[in-house]
Image (tube, rainbow, N blue to C red):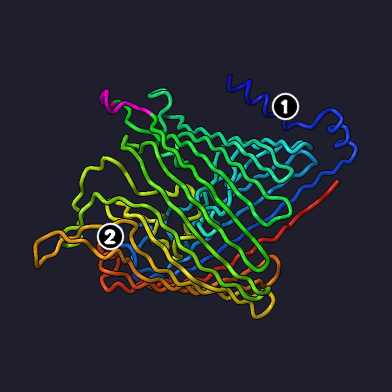
């Protein structure tokens, strides 16, 4: 059955006999080879202490990380191929470096707008809040998937099918998937986008069905291997009149997590931007992600855990979290104590200025608070009391300079003053003053290109 569906999809996206003959006549083929060298140094003072031997996870540390990629691309009228090898490491670290295939896919596109793409690929949709490939992350997420759909006349409709397996577990449990490179066992996604003709408005709808591995091999009847399903669904709007841009999104999350606990969570985001000319822009926005409220904060920063009947903390699954929730990555990239999710409110304002060609200066201020109300233990009254939701304030500065089209250098500095609640939830530095500086060099030349 699956083979039949795949065959139909490939036949729909393949060019007709006449189109294939036209392709052969034009002999319009191109091969490109590119290299990407990224080196980034970071200096941290305050953060989240861990027991990891990785120097990039230490509370106070200085380190340099690098990423090297070799990219090969092929393009014909109806066929595209791309393969990217990637190496990532930390200077001087013993072990920990990884060499992988970042991308390896083939795409067939018909003249009527139908397409099919199969292989390891980066998925980027809308503003990347739910599905994205954040280039800041040294190892951005890619997906082994079949993607197919239609694009044309203002309409875009995509379907995505993914299934992951560990070969060593096949004989033991048939379909048991754990400790793999992908964050899920199986995933199906439908995405639709429409651009209104002659009007600067675009709208998208997204539905994801995600299957997570649950249970264990050799467990009891109640713990036997199974798949727990969760769903993420919602919409995104973007309105771009002259000199302005307004964005809004709303998503819900349901189903069950890997433990079989019911999910009932939501989030929404609003953003406005003003661009009076090519040199200036100002933006402001607000994000609200729902959180759990069934955990009590007790003395000495510990957590009094209460069994969840329903998980209310929204998980923005596979989005570009660094882009949205602060450059210091305290939220949705790193976890709270014991994995607790109190949600997040993020109000921000910032601006960008380009004084000369190739140079961009930006600053952003964030105010963070929990998305839900928490209880805390008062030593004096020896009672649990409602806590202030505030987590702290973060200020970010960044400068980007394009030396040539292939060479870019950037630097940034962030400062956060955290509240007592932030210290208890994240186990940050005792003084609550967190600083982080970085500088990055990115070199991305195309070293070979030929057409025939």
Which of the 4 quarters of the picture holds residue 399?
A: bottom right
Please name the residue shown 59% across and 47% down the image. Answer: 204
Which residue position holds label 2? 425
Q: Position of residue 186 (x, y in %)?
A: 48, 34
Residue in the foreground of this view, choosing between 244 and 114:
244
Which residue position holds label 1? 11
For label 1, the SS is helix
Q: Position of residue 406 (x, y in %)?
A: 69, 65
Give the magenta part as a residue range. Answer: 219-226
Q: Position of residue 245 (x, y in %)?
A: 61, 63
Determine whether, in the image, residue 209 is placed left or right of residue 23.
Answer: left
Please name the residue shown 66% across and 50% down the image. Answer: 71
How would you rate the neighbour count of disc 2 (Cα within 10 Å): few for under 14, some for 14-19, many for 20 or more? many
Q: Is disc 2 in contact with disc 1, using a CB cutoff of under 8 Å?
A: no
Determine whether, in the image, residue 388 is placed left or right of residue 232.
Answer: left
Q: Position of residue 247 (x, y in %)?
A: 56, 58
Residue 222 located within the stretch drawn in magenta? yes
Most extreme residue toward the right is: 25
């Amino acid at each position: 059955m699956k083979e039949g569906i795949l065959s139909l999809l490939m036949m729909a996206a393949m060019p007709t006999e006449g189109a294939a003959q036209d392709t052969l006549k034009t002999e319009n083929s191109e091969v490109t080879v590119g290299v990407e060298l990224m080196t980034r140094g970071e200096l941290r003072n305050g953060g989240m202490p861990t027991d990891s031997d990785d120097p990039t996870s230490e509370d106070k540390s200085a380190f340099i990380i690098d990423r090297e990629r070799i990219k090969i691309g092929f393009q014909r009228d109806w066929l595209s191929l791309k393969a990217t090898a990637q190496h990532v490491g930390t200077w001087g670290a013993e072990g920990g470096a990884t060499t992988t295939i970042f991308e390896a896919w083939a795409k067939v596109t018909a003249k009527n707008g139908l397409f099919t793409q199969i292989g390891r690929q980066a998925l980027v949709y809308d503003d990347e809040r739910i599905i994205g490939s954040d280039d800041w992350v040294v190892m951005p997420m890619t997906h082994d998937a079949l993607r197919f759909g239609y694009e044309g006349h203002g309409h875009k409709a995509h379907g995505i099918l993914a299934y992951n397996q560990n070969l060593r577990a096949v004989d033991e449990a048939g379909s048991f998937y754990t400790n793999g490179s992908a964050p899920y066992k199986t995933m199906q996604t439908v995405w639709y986008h429409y651009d209104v003709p002659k009007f600067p408005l675009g709208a998208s709808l997204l539905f994801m069905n995600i299957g997570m591995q649950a249970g264990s091999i050799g467990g009891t009847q109640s713990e036997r291997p199974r798949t727990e399903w969760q769903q993420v669904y919602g919409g995104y709007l973007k309105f771009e009149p002259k000199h302005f841009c307004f964005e809004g999104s709303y998503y819900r999350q349901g189903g069950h997590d890997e433990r079989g606990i019911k999910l009932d969570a939501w989030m929404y985001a609003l953003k406005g931007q003003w661009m009076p000319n090519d040199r200036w822009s100002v933006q402001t926005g607000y994000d609200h992600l729902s959180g759990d409220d069934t955990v009590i904060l007790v003395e000495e920063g510990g957590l009094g855990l209460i069994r969840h009947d329903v998980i209310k903390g929204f998980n923005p699954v596979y989005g570009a979290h660094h882009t949205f929730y602060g450059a210091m990555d305290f939220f949705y990239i790193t976890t709270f104590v014991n994995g607790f999710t109190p949600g997040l409110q993020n109000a921000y304002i910032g601006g960008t200025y380009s004084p000369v060609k190739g140079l961009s200066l930006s600053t952003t201020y964030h105010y963070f608070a929990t998305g839900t109300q928490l209880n805390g233990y008062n030593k004096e009254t020896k009672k649990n009391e409602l806590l202030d939701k505030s987590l702290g304030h973060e200020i970010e500065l960044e400068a980007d300079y394009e030396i040539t089209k292939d060479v870019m250098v950037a630097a940034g500095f962030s400062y956060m003053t955290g509240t007592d609640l932030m210290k208890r939830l994240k186990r940050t530095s005792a003084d609550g003053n967190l600083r982080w500086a970085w500088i990055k060099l990115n070199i991305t030349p195309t070293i070979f290109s030929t057409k025939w």
